[in-house]
Amino acid sequence: MDSTKLVDAGSWSAYWYNGYIVSSEISRGLDIYELLPSGLLSRNELDAAKTVRLDYLNVQDQPRNVWPASFAVPRAYLDQLARDNGLPAERIAAVRAELTRAEGLTGAARKAALAALATQLHTEARSATDQPRAHALASAIGELAK
């Protein structure tokens, strides 16, 4: 091979789109990847990310990602808080259990259980190691209560 010849290759852009990473690769064209759970990324985080749906993506528009109310979102926050020790492990386990219990309820009983949990978590977030994420968890649960 002639060492003076420039060889073009490699990904020059990548975007998250409806649960996939879409990458423009110079030589191959379009690569589409799906992330898998690992020690750095949980199934709950992936499930929460996949709740964001766009009908169309033009990245130059810089659309704002909005997570709809979903039980996957607070579970993703719990995974992050557990991984980073943002809340005590026993509290995370208790919140997971209460979230599962509330998910099994319907109507006013579900709303009341979720609203009470959200209020409790906002209060506890003030002393959390990761206060912003703990408040985000409480807000995500509050959204489920609406």
Image (cartoon, rainbow, N blue to C red):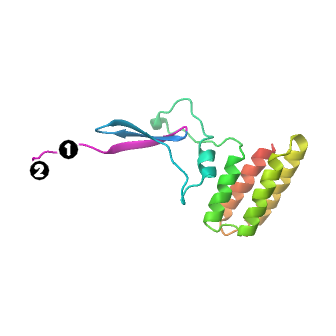
Q: Quadrant of the C terminus?
A: top right
Q: Quadrant of residue 106?
A: top right
Q: Position of residue 86 (x, y in %)?
A: 66, 66
Badge 1: residue crowd in 10 Å (few <14, some 14–19, many ≥20): few
Badge 2: residue crowd in 10 Å (few <14, some 14–19, many ≥20): few
Q: Which mark is residue 89?
A: none
Q: Position of residue 56 (x, y in %)?
A: 52, 30
Above or below, 46 relative to 86: above
Verify whether residue 145 appears in magenta: no
Q: Which residue is mark 2?
A: 3
Q: Amino acid at mark 1?
A: Val
Verify whether residue 3 appears in magenta: yes
Residue in the image at 57% along x and 33% along y:
54
Which residue sits furthest top? 55
- The answer to whether the residues at label 2 and label 1 have Cβ atoms under 8 Å apart is no
Residue in the image at 62% along x and 45% along y:
47
